[in-house]
Image (cartoon, grey):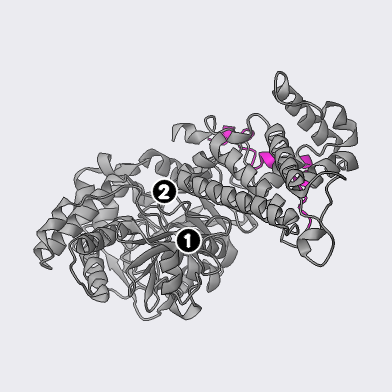
Amino acid sequence: MAALGLKAAGSGVWRGPQGAGWQLATAVLCQSCSSSASSGPGEGRRAGWDQQRAQHQAAGHSPTSAAAGRARRAAEPGPAAAGSLGSPPSPAEGVDTKSYLWARYHEMKKLVYDLLPPGVCNLLNPAAIYANNEISLRDVEIYGFDYDYTLAQYSNLLHSMIFNTARDILIEQYKYPEGLKKYEYIPGFAIRGLHYDVQKSLLMKIDAFHYVQLGTAYRGLKPVPDEEVIELYGGTQHIPLYQMSDFYGKGPSIKQFMDIFSLPEMTLLSSVIDYFMNHGIEFDQVHLYKDISDAIKDVHVKGMMYKWIEKDMEKYILHGDETYAVLNRLVNLNKKLFLITNSPFSFVDKGMKHMVGKNWRDLFDMVIVQADKPTFFTDRRKPFRKLDDKGSLQWDKINKLEKGKIYKQGNLFDFLRLTGWRGSKVLYFGDHLYSDLADLMLRHGWRTGAIVPELEPEIRIINTEQYMHSLTWQQALTGLLERMQMYQDAESKQVLLEWMQERQEIRSLTKNLFNPQFGSIFRTFHNPTYFSRRLIRFSDIYMASISCLLNYDVNFTFFPRRTPLQHEAPLWMDQLCTGCMKTPFLDEMVHIR
C-alpha cells in the first residue's frame, strides 16, 4: 500500500453526507465570498474553487439567501413533497407541464455539472481510520489483537486453495459428481456479509431493515428474477426477524457469512448448486449446505490451510513489516499488548517470527491461542492451560498470567480477574464482527476496532470521477422526483416514469462498480447493509488494516461525523467552514510514521 496511499489518495477525508446535497451546498457561499461564485466550467475553475473555499473557511459566514435559494430551488424537496403540506411549484404562464419538468431536469443537470469541483474525486483516504463512536487513544493503555486477518493479512491466493481443497473433499469423501472438478474459484463473485437462505438455496444481500436488495439474489451462479424473490417471501422483499440470523449470524434457516474466509465457501456453495441445476440433479438443500460447510471446516480444522501458509509465507502473508511497525511503536510508547486468537500456537509462532522476528513474544504481555472465540467471551467453564516453549500442554493450575508465556483456551472472565484490564482503557482489534468484537463491546465495555480490508478497494472506487458523478446526479434526480411527484396529469406521469427508469439505471451502474453481482458490502442502493449495521453497532473505529494506526498520534481523538438525521437540517456549510473535509489531518500527521 505505497506509503499507505497518503499521496495517491490525497490527504482529505470526506466524512460528510454523500450525494448531491454536499456538492450543491459548496456553491452556497458567504456574502463576502460571493464575488467569485460565478466561476463556471472552463479555464480558472480550479483556482476559483480553491479561492472560494479558502475565503469561505476564513470568513466563517452564513450562506447568502440568493445562492442558497438557487441550489434549493433546483434540488431540495419543497412542501409539495409532503403531499398535503403544500402545492407543487407552478410552471410559468403559457408553458405546459411536460416542458416545465424537462426544463427543471436540464437546469438541475447543469447545476450538478457546474458544482462538482475539480479534485473532488480524491477526498477519501484509504489509510484513514473511521469512527462510529468518539474515542481518545490517550485513554487506551492496553491494545489487544486477533491474529488472522488482523495481525496477519493474507493474499487472495489462499481463497483459491481453500475452494479447490474443499471441492475435492466433496468429490473424494462425500462422493459428489466428478464434474465439479471443472469449477474453479471465482475471485470477486461474492462479498462478505451476504445471507444464505438454506431452504431456498438463495444467496443474497440484505439491508439494515431486513429487506433483500433486488438484483442481488443468486441461486447457484445465476441471478434470480426480482419477481421470483418477492414471491418466495410471500409477496415482499422483507425477511421476518425470526428467520434472520441470531446474535452470532447463525439463524435457524438463514446464515450470514461474516468471515473473510467465507468467500470461498460462498463461491463453492454457488458452484455446486449451479452444477446440480444445469444437470437436472435434485438435491436436499439442508444436506448440501451442511456438506459444503463441513468440507470447508475440514480445511481449517485438519490444519491444511496452516500447512500451506507455513510452507510459503512470502506468498500468502502480506504487509508483515507494517505489523512489526505497529507493535513496536506501541511497545515503545509503553502500551501493554496482548493476543487472543483461535489459531494454534505453532502456526501463530511461525507467522509472527516471519513478520516480527524470533523475539516477537517479548512485545506481548499475554498470548492466548486456541481461545475458541466467541465462546471465550461468554462461557466461564474453560480454564486457562499453559504451553511450554515447544507448544506442549502443561497441567499446572493458572493463578496468574505471565508476560512471555503462552496460554491455551480459558475464558474472558478469568482473564479480567487475573489482569484487571477492564473497560475503556482496553482497545481490541479483530476482523470478525461477531466472534471478535460484539461481546467485548456489548457485555464487557472494551473499546473495539474492526479490520475491514474491503475498505481500501471500495474507497478507491468512491474516489473515481465515474462514481462521484453518477452518485451526485442520482441524488439530484431523486430530489427532483420527490419534489415533482405532485404533477399527476398523463404527460407528467410519463416524464416521472422516465426519470424513475433513469434513476434505476444509475443505481445499477454504481452498484456494479463495486461488484457486478452484489455491489458494495457497506450499502444497498441507498440503505446501509446488514453488515454495515453490525459494523456500526460493534466497533468504535474501523479501518482497512492495523497499519492505519501508524498515521495517527498515540493521543489522537477520533470524532464521528455528525451526519444529519432525516428530520434534522443538513449543515453542510458548517462542515465546510470548520474544515471537517480535511480531518483526520493526515498531511499534518505524516511525520508520525
| Place of residue 47 in the rendered image (x, y in percent of width and height, measured from the top left) | 73, 22
Work out whether residue 347 can be spotted: yes
- Looking at the rendered image, the disc whose residue lies closer to the viewer, 2 or 1, is 1
Query: Which residue has dot 2 on it?
Result: 516
- Please indicate whether residue 267 sits to the left or right of residue 439 in the image: left
State which tag comes first along the sequence, 2 or 1.
1
Quadrant containing the N terminus is top left
> What segment is highlighted magenta in the picture?
569-593
Q: Residues within 10 Å of mark 1 (few under 14, many from 20)?
A: many
Which residue sits at x=34%, y=69%? 372
Dot 2: what SS?
Answer: loop
Does residue 357 appear anywhere in the picture? no
Of 70 and 493, the residue lying toward us: 493
Residue 238 position in % (x across, y down): 51, 72
Q: Please, what is the three-letter code of the amino acid marked with disc 2?
A: Pro
Magenta stretch contains residue 572? yes
Residue ID for mark 1 = 214
Structural crowding at the residue carrying mark 2, measured as other residues with C-alpha within 10 Å and reported as few (<14), some (14–19) or many (≥20): some
Name the residue: 40% across, 79% down.
379
Dot 1: what SS?
strand
Q: Quadrant of residue 61?
A: top right
